[in-house]
Amino acid sequence: MAYKVLSSLTANNVNSADLLKVKTDLLIIAVNKKTAAATELKGLQASPQSLVKESIKEINSGSRKSIFLPAPAKVGAKNILLIKEPDPKAASFLVLRYYEEIMGLVKSSKAKDFAYLMSSTTSKNFDDVWAAEVAARTFESSAYTFNATKNKTVKPITVKKGTLLFAGLTPAKLRSVRTAVKLGHAVGEGMNATKHLGDLPANHCTPRIIERKTKALKKDFPALKISSLNERDMEKLKMGSYLSVGKGSDEPSRMMTIEYKGGAKDKQPIVLVGKGITFDTGGISIKPSPAMDEMKWDMCGAASVFGIMQTLARLKAKVNVVGLLVCAENMPSARATKPGDVVTSMSGQTIEILNTDAEGRLVLCDALTYSKKFKPSHVIDMATLTGAVVVALGSPATGVMANNQLLADKILAAGEKSGDRAWQLPLWEEYAHCTKTNFADLANIGGGREAGTIHAASFLSNFTKDFKWAHMDIAASAWNGGAKKGGTGRPVPLLAELILNGNL
């Protein structure tokens, strides 16, 4: 199943005469101090009954941020939206918010299509190619609305098409911009897939349902090779740590593998490992009830793998990537794993489970061991792993820890370029004490309240000695709470930038 909202996103060059002929429900014009003098707007401003010139002045005066207008006679557009754009020196997150705001206005207008005239002034921080990619990505991802479990309150998505308009681009630059729009559209689609899987209620998104949805990707993306492991398969592989997490649930655990081979045959793949706890009660170490409904998003790591893999397939990217969706449900019952139980991981290391709510690392450690079979160049896991990262970094940044500094540097750089930012935390030997116990090779928690995010990564590092590895804690960045409750689609933009342009 594909998760594209906008059936098409394109880019075109326009001059003053062309702009008058653009047929669209909503023509959107970015406004800054130089907009009134833009040559491509001369005809529109001079058109009889046009209020565009006056509206530009009003917005630049600061009295209004956006203005809707009916289009003047003999203009192809039905309506016009003028909107103040961020300062040219604005940080990338403000640019992202700006594009999100535009799509919100497009949706509220009920337009079926829109055309957005990009500013004729290039930002001091980013060029037209970057702006085109990010605009396309954000328009697609912001067009998403969750309706899957609604009957009476469905909000249909009317917008289906979009065009980015530029003035004065050379043929070579226009080709680059169109490539960027295609890339951004595909990344936005991957974000929507990630959001949709995360937003589904836990009873609509069990490990077996994710398995079916993963296998269904083959219909739209035949280049993907998809397989899965059931609990019997995991028992044969001696994944005792992984299996311990789902013991209390009636829903059996699953691990899906998605392989994409678009690069050279001799190129080692990147392996992406995503935590997919479809609901996390905490098990016997049960969580407090406030906001426990948000634990349906504890599978956002797996959802991110689901999204990025279809993005790569959509783009026919020249890379080799393997995605592992590591899915289980953590429930309390008479069969559930108890604090103090000792299990044996696939690596042969025994683990004393001191807290059953530290379950994500228990499924990830066996998946990391399993990833060695693919002879990876790099392994990156992503997981909504610790509340501690929410306290440490809040929602703007994903926490990153790694056993290879070059890999960490490239992840951070990809975050800056994409606007999907990350921040590195240390993974020093001083933190290794957190895994010590008298009763097994490792303990799954330790160290009390301090450095919880780092301790989780320190535990995982015991299973990554044979490859270059990074851990991404997305517990704060993968979804929003409160009034805007819902998945964000992160870190799909970061992963796309890293895999496609990071030279791993």
Image (cartoon, helix red, strand yellow):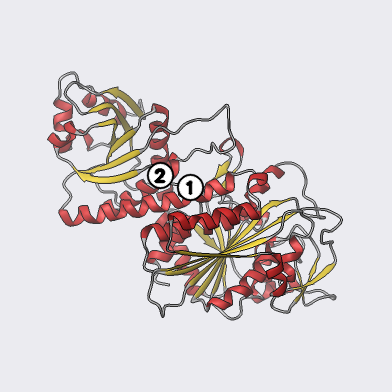
How far across and down, in percent of the image, does residue 165 sit? 24, 42
**Residue 454 appears anywhere in the view:** yes
Q: Secondary structure at mark 1?
A: helix
How far across and down, in percent of the image, does residue 216 sit? 52, 54
Mark 1 surroundings: few (<14), some (14-19) or many (≥20) residues within 10 A:
many
How far across and down, in percent of the image, does residue 283 sit? 78, 55
User: Which of disc 1 and disc 2 is earlier in sequence?
Assistant: 2
- Relative depth, front residue between 276 and 414: 276
The correct choice, above or below, for 285 with respect to 468 in the image is above
Q: How many marks?
A: 2
Q: Quadrant of the C terminus?
A: bottom left
Mark 2 surroundings: few (<14), some (14-19) or many (≥20) residues within 10 A:
many
Left/right placement of residue 165 relative to residue 308 reads: left
Left/right placement of residue 329 relative to residue 501 reads: right
Q: Are marks 2 and 1 in contact (CB under 8 Å)?
A: yes
The correct choice, above or below, for 134 with respect to 162 in the image is below
At a point 12% along the width and 34% down the height, the residue shown is 17
The correct choice, above or below, for 60 with respect to 403 in the image is above
Left/right placement of residue 289 relative to residue 88 reads: right
How far across and down, in percent of the image, does residue 156 sit? 47, 31
At a point 82% along the width and 58% down the height, the residue shown is 336
- Relative depth, front residue between 368 and 448: 368
Residue type at numbered disc 2: Glu
Within the image, what quadrant is residue 324 found in? bottom right
Within the image, what quadrant is residue 199 found in? top right
At a point 16% along the width and 23% down the height, the residue shown is 74
Q: Secondary structure at mark 2?
A: helix
Q: CA distance from mark 2 to mark 1?
A: 8 Å
**Residue 304 appears anywhere in the view:** no
Q: Which residue is mark 1?
A: 192
Question: Mark number for residue 140?
Answer: 2
- Relative depth, front residue between 495 and 396: 495
